[in-house]
Amino acid sequence: LMKMKGHNGLCPCRMCNIIGIRIQTAGSKNNCHYIPLHRNELNSSYSATDLPSRTHAQFMSDADHVDNAPNPAEADRRAKMCGIKGVPILAALSSLEFPFSFPYDFMHLVWENVVKSLILLWTGEFKPLKPDSNQPYRIGKSVWDAIGRATAEAGSTVPSAFGCRVPNISERRSEFSAEAYSNWTTFLAPVLLREFLNEEYYAHFVKLVSLLTVSTRDELSRNDITLLRSGFSSCV
């Protein structure tokens, strides 16, 4: 709907103009752009509370620039630079403002993205990074298998009022729904990971879980919003 290029664009974020970088490792063919806030290059880091936000005027200007390219190759180059593939058809509606009329949805942003990425990092399956001894957040395969079995067994004693039964996260992760990721992250993981995740990373994870728990409340107070803003900013 927004005609965004996503992680294939140099500016992959729909909301801001943060510049993406590729994680290059020997033998890797990964072309995705990632957007870490803290980087090695001088003067290239970003503040989570002061990102270079896109504006409607700039968004439409970039989209027009792509549409007015003299040829498809130039259009693709321009789209890659700005992260926008052209003017969206919904831009004809004056009531919409790009990108702010299209916020992220929590399910895909967190349960189907952040949590999945954390698990890939813990298990050494995050493709851009090859497993090595300099990854203190890694969880060994035998331990992860045990966590998977404990996850599945917990379903026999967790009341159904708490949500769906969570499968073995080690062997049946392909069967996980967003609800399963949510239940595992908020109810099971803080207990299952306590003895096996590096203390520093475990504390960070528990902080994230507490923020996610607040985020999913039916109502949020002004204090909750302030807490979430500062909490998520410090998490990244």
Image (tube, rainbow, N blue to C red):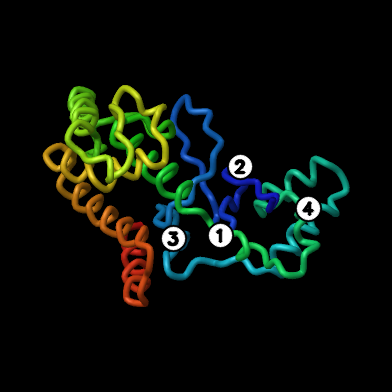
Q: Is the residue under label 3 in contact with that under label 2 (CB below 8 Å)? A: no
Residue corresponding to mark 2: 8
Considering the numbered disc 4 on the image, is that residue within a helix, a strand or a loop?
helix
- Using a 10 Å C-alpha cutoff, classify the residue at mark 3 as few (fewer than 14 neighbours), some (14 to 19) or many (20 or more): some
Residue corresponding to mark 4: 66
Give whichever of discs 3 and 4 has the lower sequence position: 3
Which residue is at 18% across, 26% downward?
A: 146
Residue corresponding to mark 3: 45
Q: Residue furthest left?
A: 195
Identify which amino acid the numbered label 1 is placed on: Pro
Q: Between marks 2 and 1, how big is the CA–CA gap?
A: 20 Å
Q: Between marks 1 and 4, how big is the CA–CA gap?
A: 23 Å
Considering the numbered disc 2 on the image, is that residue within a helix, a strand or a loop?
helix
Q: Between marks 3 and 4, how big is the CA–CA gap?
A: 28 Å
Give whichever of discs 1 and 4 has the lower sequence position: 4
Q: Is residue 41 above or below residue 130?
A: below
227 or 55: nearer the viewer: 227
163 or 195: nearer the viewer: 163
Which disc is residue 103 wearing? 1
Identify which amino acid the numbered label 2 is placed on: Asn
